[in-house]
């Protein structure tokens, strides 16, 4: 817990004791506490009403068994959760993750982050996260369908368009949302916007697929513009090759950047010419349709593949980590800085270890934490809910403009709360955490003891 003040240490000691064995949850809370506790000290009402203690305890955690039949007729069993973290400013909202590593600690960290990310969007969205240790890799479409249907059979009673609205995350994309929505509709006999990321034919929004990646690039652009610079001509590293990574690459290169890496859990490819045009179209087909592996890109286009490694040793101007949590270690952060990185913009949730995040802040580079940088996804989810409630659909241009406008507002809130008088540097970590906190905390104060 280096860098923490005595008050942060004291608070964290209690949190760790109340939540043993959940290191990523501790990490997410610590990043937040380091920014927010000094602010609370100046505004004692938050302390007097135990806001921080209440905010770090989920409203409700639902755990359940999911039984489904594989293609061989064997009964399989997985564990699933929904962590309804905080609904002070709107119905619970957040994705579902299917990955073998999913456990309660991961979902608590993600639900906690989601609460403040959603607050930053300016939309009326509470925070939640859910998922299962189900591994979709290597499963047939029918197996995935049976799993999703079995999961929704239990989940349906806990969600609703005014209660809790799940969406996608790692391992949950358009295919899974469709299976989940189909079962919900059947159980409830109601056609309603209970999930986001739906297909366009049944209530989905244009740009939702692209939103997290596009939003992340727009945020990087805002930070650069604020310093009188732009993405044009910048060399960028992207990690991952899933939903967030693909559309980060797409928008970044459309804005004149050269993206030279992409990765999956097997390793990374380095294409110094840039992943663009037909190569990007091929990569999208590989990952979105064929569900293939990233090394196939290197074979196809004759570039280097680095097995078992992450891309952070490649010199760059901008890094977009878009795969998973803690994918940038403190050593990776040092290497990025030594190679002259100027912007780190987090597409994934908490991709940087705390010690690495401290290094970025101390170096005064443009460092955007996930809750600000990747809020574009849930923003367009919120816009999908609005369109469902209005029973109409906005055009691509309308949704894109609203997304850009909200990213501008998120950036503005970070500047307001992350600036220090007399210094041109913006501490985006401090700004995002304080701005996200204030709205939720003030709602809780207004409600009294609930
Ligand atoms: P996808 O499942 O579409 O893609 C995930 C990518 O990350 C894949 O390339 C995957 O490789 C890689 N990856 C996942 N887990 C690991 C791991 N443990 N080690 C190495 N690589 C890994 O997920 P998304 O693109 O939707 O999500 C990526 C990140 O963005 C996550 O942190 C998610 O929480 C966050 N996010 C997603 C949003 C969304 O709208 N989807 C919104 C905001 C944030 P492989 O295929 O080999 O597993
Ligand atoms: O982490 C995230 O913000 C998401 N996975 C998207 C959540 C949503 O409800 O769209």
Image (cartoon, rainbow, N blue to C red):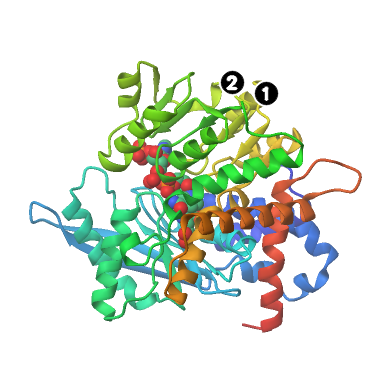
Q: Is residue 21 visible?
A: no
Dividing the image into four quarters, tell me where ligand 1 lies: top left
Left or right: residue 35 versus residue 56 is right
- The quarter of the picture where residue 191 lies is bottom left
Does mark 1's beta carbon lie closer than 8 Å to ligand 1?
A: no
Where does residue 9 sit, x and y in percent of width and height? Answer: 71, 53
Q: Residues within 10 Å of mark 2 (few under 14, many from 20)?
A: some
Where does residue 169 sit, x and y in percent of width and height? Answer: 42, 53
Do labels 2 and 1 touch, CB within 8 Å?
yes
Location of residue 72 with respect to 196 vertically, above or below: above
Where does residue 361 sit, x and y in percent of width and height? Answer: 72, 39
- Is residue 439 or residue 48 the one in the foreground? 439
Location of residue 211 with respect to 312 vertically, above or below: below
Q: Residues within 10 Å of mark 1 (few under 14, many from 20)?
A: some
Does mark 2's beta carbon lie closer than 8 Å to ligand 1?
A: no
Element carrying mark 2: loop
- The quarter of the picture where residue 48 lies is bottom right
- Is residue 74 or residue 187 the one in the foreground? 187
Where does residue 345 sit, x and y in percent of width and height? Answer: 60, 40
Residue 315 bears which disc, if any? 2
Q: Quadrant of the C terminus?
A: bottom right
Left or right: residue 22 versus residue 156 is right
Left or right: residue 397 versus residue 42 is left
Q: Is residue 37 visible?
A: yes
Picture residue at 30% right of the left edge, 32% below the top: 293
- Name which of mark 2 and mark 1 comes first in the sequence: 2
Element carrying mark 1: loop
Location of residue 294 with respect to 85 vertically, above or below: above
Picture residue at 48% right of the left edge, 62% below the top: 381
Residue under numbered circle 1: 340
Q: How many marks?
A: 2
Picture residue at 53% right of the left edge, 50% below the top: 24
């Amino acid at each position: 817990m280096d860098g923490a003040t005595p008050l942060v240490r004291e608070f964290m000691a209690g949190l760790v004791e109340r939540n043993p064995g959940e290191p990523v949850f501790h990490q997410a809370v610590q990043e937040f506490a380091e920014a927010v506790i000094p602010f609370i000290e100046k505004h004692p009402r938050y302390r007097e009403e135990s806001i921080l203690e209440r905010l770090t305890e989920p409203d409700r955690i639902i755990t359940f068994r999911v039984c489904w039949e594989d293609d061989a007729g064997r009964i399989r069993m997985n564990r699933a959760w929904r962590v309804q973290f905080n609904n002070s400013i709107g119905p619970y909202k957040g994705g579902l993750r299917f990955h073998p590593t999913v456990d309660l600690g991961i979902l608590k960290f993600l639900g906690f982050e989601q609460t403040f990310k959603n607050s930053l969007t300016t939309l009326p969205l509470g925070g939640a996260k859910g998922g299962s240790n189900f591994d979709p890799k290597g499963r047939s479409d029918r197996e995935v369908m049976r799993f999703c249907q079995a999961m929704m059979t239990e989940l349906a009673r806990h969600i609703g368009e005014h209660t809790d609205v799940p969406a996608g995350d790692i391992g949950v994309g358009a295919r899974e949302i469709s299976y989940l929505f189909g079962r919900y509709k059947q159980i409830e006999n109601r056609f309603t916007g209970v999930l986001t990321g739906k297909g366009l034919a049944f209530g989905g929004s244009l740009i939702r697929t692209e939103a997290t990646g596009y939003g992340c690039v727009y945020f990087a652009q805002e930070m650069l513009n604020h310093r009188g610079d732009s993405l044009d001509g910048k060399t960028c590293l992207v990690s991952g090759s899933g939903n967030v990574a693909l559309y980060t690459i797409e928008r970044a290169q459309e804005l004149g950047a050269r993206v030279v890496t992409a990765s999956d859990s097997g390793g990374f490819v380095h294409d110094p010419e840039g992943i663009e045009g037909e190569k990007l179209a091929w990569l999208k087909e590989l990952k979105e349709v064929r569900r293939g592996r990233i090394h196939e890109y290197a074979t196809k286009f004759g570039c280097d593949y680095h097995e078992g490694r992450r891309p952070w040793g490649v010199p760059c101007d901008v890094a977009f980590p878009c795969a998973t949590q803690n994918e940038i270690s403190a050593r990776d952060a040092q290497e990025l800085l030594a190679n002259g990185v100027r912007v780190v913009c987090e597409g994934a949730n908490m991709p940087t270890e705390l010690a690495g995040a401290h290094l970025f802040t101390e170096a005064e580079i443009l460092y955007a934490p996930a809750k600000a940088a990747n809020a574009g996804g849930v923003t367009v989810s919120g816009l999908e809910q609005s369109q469902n409630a209005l029973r109409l659909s906005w055009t691509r241009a309308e949704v894109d403009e609203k997304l850009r406008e909200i990213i501008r507002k998120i950036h503005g809130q970070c500047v307001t709360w992350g600036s220090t008088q007399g210094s041109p540097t913006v501490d985006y970590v401090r700004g995002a955490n304080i701005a996200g906190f204030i709205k939720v905390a003030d709602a809780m104060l207004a409600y009294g003891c609930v």
